[in-house]
Image (cartoon, rainbow, N blue to C red):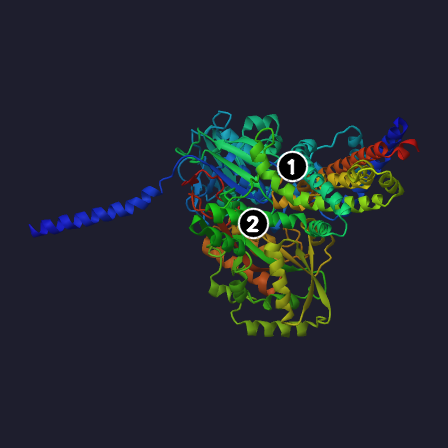
Amino acid sequence: MRKYILKRLLLVIPTLFGAAALVFIMLRLIPGDICEIRMSGDGGYFDQRALDQCREDSGTNLPMMTQFINFIWGLMRFDFGTSMWTGQPVLTEIALRFELSLQVAIMATIIGVIIAIPLGTISAVKQNTWIDYVVRAFSIAGIATPSFWLGILIILGLLMSTQYVLGTPWMPPITYKPIWEAPLYNLSMLIWPTVATGYRYSAVVTRMTRSALLEVLREDYVRTARAKGLWEKVIIRKHALKNALLPVVTIVGMEFAFLMGGLAVTEQVFNLNGVGKLFVDSVLNNDYTMTQSLVMLVVMIFVMVNFLVDICYAWMDPRIRYS
Amino acid sequence: MKLARIKAVCAAVLGIAAVHTAIPAAAQTPKRGGTLNYVVPAEPPGYDGHREGTFAMLQPIRPYYSVLIRVDPNNPSTTTDFVCDVCAGKVPEPTDDGKVYTFKLRDDVKFHTGETMTADDVVASFNKIIFPPKGVRSLRRGMFSMVESVTNPDKSTVVFKLKFATNAFIPVLAIPFNWIYQKKILDKDIHWYETNIGGSGPFIFKERQAGAFMRGDRNPNYYHKGQPYLDGIRAIFATKESLRVQAIRGGRADIEFRGFPPASRDDLVKALGKDVTVQESTWNCPIMFSPNHKRKPFDDARVRRALSLAVDRWGGAKYLSKIALVKTVAGITFPGHALSPSDEELKQIAGWWPDLKKSRAEARKLLKESGADLSKTYLFIVRGVDQPYKIIATWLIDQWKQVGINFKMETHPTGPFYAIQRGSKEFDVSTDASCNTIINPLVDVTKYLSDDRASNNYYQYKDREVDALYDKMQRLTDVKAQRKLMFEIAKLTLDTHANQFPVLWWNRIVVHRSYVKGWKVSPSHYLNQALDNVWLDK
């Protein structure tokens, strides 16, 4: 097991380097100049010398190779530099957003898993009954409904219903306070995006749980368990579900990592100051240092989650441990 | 006796009338307290007003700073009414044939650090703006090209010496980004203000939550006595327009200063009725289309002129103003300014003729004469922003089709759009705008000068006739003579040489909660943002 973990950890280094090189090149392929965006928006007057100075300050006038070496050298020292847009340290800019995104991801994962695993299991056990049809319709609707659209509907629904009932329209707060500072305020802000994303999340996991469990329930060892006269509940819980959860864990891990950086539109709908929104803003602003750091952060999260998923695999399936 | 009785009745009636008129006046007496929450569509790129140009930094940060002079906050729609902020009394008249401006400073202006502002601070700030040392960015340095020196003979006097007398100077001085910094700090680290905030404005900066909001508290030592009325301000960053609209509807924000499109205004008014107030103004910002003079057939003035003639500006203003934030028909200068032509004069310029049939017939004739290949589809690049770029661009394509010239519209996000417009120049016609802070036609029209003189002219042409007229106009102080030259420049730019074309001028629609008082709409989203006269009638 230790050798397996070490091997997985060593694989992280080339993965990170490859991702760094890729993001560096791809960002430079996108046309645009942060200084132009910053200084001459809407066609107004600007001073050419100030524009040249801006390029010098941001380092975009340096040769590409020098920029790449600076970037990699910074990464090796965990120095992500300063945002070319705000001039503030990249890590400071990311820290607060990371906290919010992490909370949304955790809450959505909890909602998703709590709904999905029982629903998926029931759906598989009651295959082709009306219960199965209802669960399938619910999950297909979840996959088909974009989270941001559901988010817009939630906000509009809240505004209209509160205006109708209370006489004054109410919407969730649009600025963030950490949960340990103002728990009610925090939850009244984050519960809605969590529901919007958690629904889609649960739909994906429900489908996966159902199909994986159906497959496992047809295995020989399940038939043997039944032949031995074990209770159906024990067969499902102890023998079938544990094995069926292998692909489900992968999906949960991937979805969690996605939520950490991929909620760009939903975050904008609810004005969540998360990593996804920062991602979009920094790409639109051609803020290379920020985008590079964010990509590396998301890559690290994916690598870490994959690593944890692999460990879970090894824990759940002895064949992986011993191979 | 009878006369005395009549007098008494009259006095009573007058007294009642006086009380009645006094009631609304009393109701308008500013109240102290409360926090103003306002939504801003983007986050500030930095904190130094001298080097940034976006409203996204001005709106959240301007309330923490003072300026030398400003547009009158009680009459911000004016194009000429400037008042002192940290200077004492009225804005001074020039001496020495218009070449010297001497400002006396107030003696009660204190920085938030507690130190008194002196002329040293004002001079150091303007020297940073006008004569920045190497390595320091100053975005509006070129606007001060008329200034020879800024000095202070004593601690309370600032003297601007100009190279030549010009009417452009006072408006340039009133640009709301010209914040007064502390000399002591600048001497220590001239870059300090790029990442820190510390001024002498009506509010004291307290907190920034990256990407979320900026917050400030009332400055109790503010020099405009009794102001500010608010206890605090909070600028909330919200990228999505729909979210900003909903924030006002749901009571999470009181106002959005940039401006909403007409549909959002109508939605809010429908949902909230008298709980919201709408203020509108023509915006110092024309949306434009500009041909690439190096690409055939747009190297021919007749083709460019035909493009302008095809556009129904007067008709378009009526229906486009219902769906887009545009409204006013004007030329190269802000409508209503002393240097702008009247509608009657404007109608003499091709493209602004009142008779659309005649215009389009002329356009078709010009296209035929020029031999332009009308079987081809030309490339029209558009900045990927809905309001008003994409809407107006879609409309323009239809307008040009009416005279037989076809365009393919290519929409790009801002970064790639600029890269094409300003870098590769791979386009036939481009959308553009000319949004400026203060209304100062003498500076604003520099966009129409030759491309080797105007940093924001991207269309590869030189027009020395326009350059010469501009140079002549800039050194005049007689408004009548300047107006005449300005019209000549407009005629050359829009008609004879057909260089670049404003389509319509933007219309600023600000919707706010009705309890927000004291704030008046201005013709630019950069102006009147000190918020010292804003109060909440809650």
* B431 or B226, nearer to the observer: B226
Tell me whether marks 2 and 1 sit on the same chain: yes
Q: Residues within 10 Å of mark 1 (few under 14, many from 20)?
A: some
- Pick out the residue farthest to the right: A323
* B185 or B133, nearer to the observer: B185
Q: Which numbered circle lies on residue A156?
A: 2
Q: Quadrant of the C terminus of chain B?
A: top left
Callout 1: SS:
loop
**Discs 2/1, front:** 2
**Is residue A151 among the parts visible in the rendering?**
yes
Q: CA distance from mark 2 to mark 1?
A: 33 Å
Name the residue type under label 1.
Thr
Q: Which numbered circle lies on residue A289?
A: none
Write down the residue under mark 1: A86
Name the image quarter holding residue A270: top right
Name the residue type under label 2.
Leu
Q: Chain of mark 1?
A: A
